[in-house]
Image (cartoon, grey):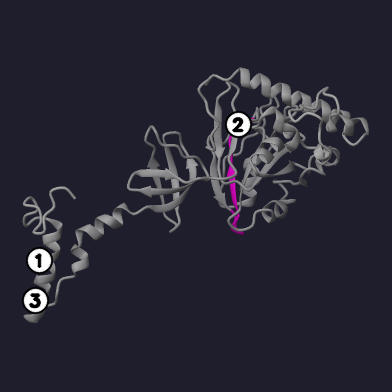
Amino acid sequence: MAGHRKGGSKHEGKGSAHDTSKRVRKGGAREARKGKPARDAAATDLPAALEEALAPKAGRVVAHHGVAVLVRFDDGSTRQIWLAPEQRAVVGDRVDVRGERLEALPAHGVLRRRDPRGRERTIATNLDRLFIVVALEPREQPGYIDRGIVIARAAGIEPTLVVNKCDLPGSAALVERLGEIYGRSCEVLAVSASQGTGLDAIAGLLAPDLMGALVGPSGVGKSSLLNALVPDLALTVSELNRGSGHGRHTTTTATLHTLAGGGILVDTAGFKDFIAVDVEPGEVAACFPGFEGALEAGCRFRDCLHRSEPDCAVLAAAAAGRIAPRRLEAYSALLDELAAASSRSTDPGFRKSSR
């Protein structure tokens, strides 16, 4: 180090931490010789105390409140951390905290979506499973389930379709229809938060330390499901809006909750629109429900979008009856939606990121 000499810098003097530790050791020895109890050198070891204070403390973000996040540390304690302007952290992030500084660690299973204004939002990270919650009422937007499955698969997250309120008249027919469409693409669970039906199936898919997220339109009962799965939670539950038939938003930010069996669930604000991001048009077919196996034969063109191109494996599977016409129509509609959402983006400088 520049300016360092064997005898020590002239600016160290008697007040330096180095000299202080030497005086503590010498003083303790003198007191021991005089029969006095030696002082605890570790208690006054300033460098060690400073090092301990600056050591990173590991934890996970369990709630996001815009300018601050709530972190649950691995020792069970929790603390709110205010985010500096350049800091980014979302629910599910594993983080290291040093004092008031937070560092988000690399993540997998990143759930992102585009809002109606074209801005891209990261909702949660480190997800292993995405529970797409729908119900007989209110009905989801056309293509909602397809978008959710594509987003999950593109992010390496296992999708699961949850049909809530299965105690309502007519729900059995809905479960059967969705099972026919999506049963070969993902698990379809019939549940009732109010009656406690099917809750074990949800919890059973989240082994200890696996994390899942509940997403769905407002009013389908995500908060009711969480209240049933985590009895001490007592989230606010609202009734459907009598005029529109839609639910009122009762969750305003993503929050993380631990189940009795050790699994973790993230509750999210209602997704009226679930617009895919991080998915290129050429990647949609590989993630689209109902196209499983159709691409194995391979298309003539590597950049085939499976619309009208010659020697297309998907179109051939549709012509042979292996892909239903409505599935092909839904796929084309999703491609059109992605193109429209991309053109509406208000952030032309955005670069694709894992966060």
Amino acid, disc 3: Glu
Mark 3 element type: helix
**Mark 1 neighbour density, 10 Å: few (under 14) some (14–19) many (20 or more):** some
Give the x, y percent position of residue 68: 41, 38
Tell me if residue 137 is in the magenta stretch: no
Is tag 2's residue or tag 3's residue first in the polypeptide sequence? 3
Alpha carbon distance from label 3 to label 1: 12 Å
Residue at (55, 43) in percent of width and height = 125
Mark 1 element type: helix
Q: Main secondary structure of the magenta part?
A: loop
Residue 36, by quadrant, is bottom left
Q: Residue 31 shows which numbered tag?
A: 3
Residue at (72, 32) in percent of width and height = 284
Left or right of residue 11: residue 163: right
Looking at this rendering, what residue extends furthest in the right direction? 320
Amino acid, disc 2: Arg
Q: Which residue is mark 2?
A: 113
Is tag 3's residue or tag 1's residue first in the polypeptide sequence? 1
- Mark 3 or 1: in front is 1
Residue at (73, 46) in percent of width and height = 192
Amino acid, disc 1: Arg
Alpha carbon distance from label 2 to label 3: 67 Å
In this view of the protein, can residue 33 be seen by the observer? Answer: yes
Is tag 2's residue or tag 1's residue first in the polypeptide sequence? 1
